[in-house]
Image (spheres, grey):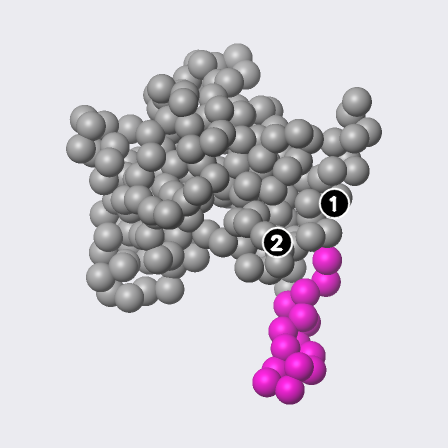
Amino acid sequence: MSQSLPAFWAVIPAAGIGARMAADRPKQYLELGGRTILEHSLDCFLDHPCLKGVVVSLAADDPYWPHLQSARDARIQRAAGGRERADSVLNALLLLHEQGAADDDWVLVHDAARPNLARTDLDKLLAELADDPVGGLLAVPARDTLKRADARGRVSATVDRSTIWQAFTPQMFRLGALHRALADSLVADAAITDEASAIEWAGQAPRLIEGRSDNIKVTRPEDLEWLRQRWALRR
């Protein structure tokens, strides 16, 4: 990128258990390329010169994190994980506030199980949103034909995909705005599935930044196998 990129904090909510993986441990601690998925998800941020620090939100009884090399990295702080993703992110933002982070600081929230983030995508997000009044997120336009189902599991309509995007992470917003949006939406018991939906609930319109489609989130066993095969080809 030719322009200077803004400094930022990174937040990684990592308190989930990933039940759909049917594994013996939370999916972020499964092995990929000789290290855990979580360590790979952290790498792209830790290697970035504009990083101010990272907060990882973890379950109180997490037995895996202390054994990772990342746990000894002075740039990474640990916050309490919550019942839902929004709770975990809010706890991380509260920690940043307590330690003097400013309301107008940029915060990038990234999935713990999204280990294939490209540096080019991260730089593109930072560059495109550096002066944006709201913030935004990496996303990809829908490619496949989309169907709406009825209660019987039959197609009720074909959805116009021209305006449909699949939301990825990182999602990039100002610390103060995201903090208020998450706190207020949780009090209102609103349906918040990602940071962008909290900002939307607060009446703002996040910007969509098109990224790579291989920035996938490991949700099912076949996702992890796909990444293992793809990474093996790099060697």
Q: What span is in magenta?
A: 144-159
What residue is shown at x 42% (from left), y 28% (from top)? 71
Where disc 2 sits, the SS reads: loop
Query: Image quarter for residue 103?
Result: top left
How many labels sit on residues? 2
Q: CA distance from mark 1 to mark 2?
A: 13 Å
Above or below 20: residue 34:
above
**The disc labelled 2 sits on which kind of residue?**
Ala
Q: Does the magenta segment cover residue 147?
A: yes
* Percent coordinates x, y for residue 126 in the rendering: 46, 27
- Quick check: 71 left or right of 39? left
What residue is shown at x 23% (from left), y 47% (from top)? 180
Residue to which mark 1 is pinned: 225
What residue is shown at x 69% (from left), y 82% (from top)? 154
* Percent coordinates x, y for residue 159 in the rendering: 64, 68
- Quick check: 141 left or right of 26? right
- Specify few, some or many for label 2: CA neighbours under 10 Å numbering under 14, 14-19, or 20 or more: some
Residue 65 visible from this viewpoint: yes
**The disc labelled 1 sits on which kind of residue?**
Glu
- Specify few, some or many for label 1: CA neighbours under 10 Å numbering under 14, 14-19, or 20 or more: few
Query: Image quarter for residue 129?
Result: top left
Q: Nearer the viewer, mark 1 or mark 2?
A: 2
Where disc 1 sits, the SS reads: helix
Residue to which mark 2 is pinned: 23
* Percent coordinates x, y for residue 201 in the rendering: 33, 57
Above or below 205: residue 187:
below
- Position of the C terminus, as image quadrant, is top right
As rendered, which of 174 and 27 lies closer to the eye? 27
- Position of the N terminus, as image quadrant, is top right
Residue 200 visible from this viewpoint: no
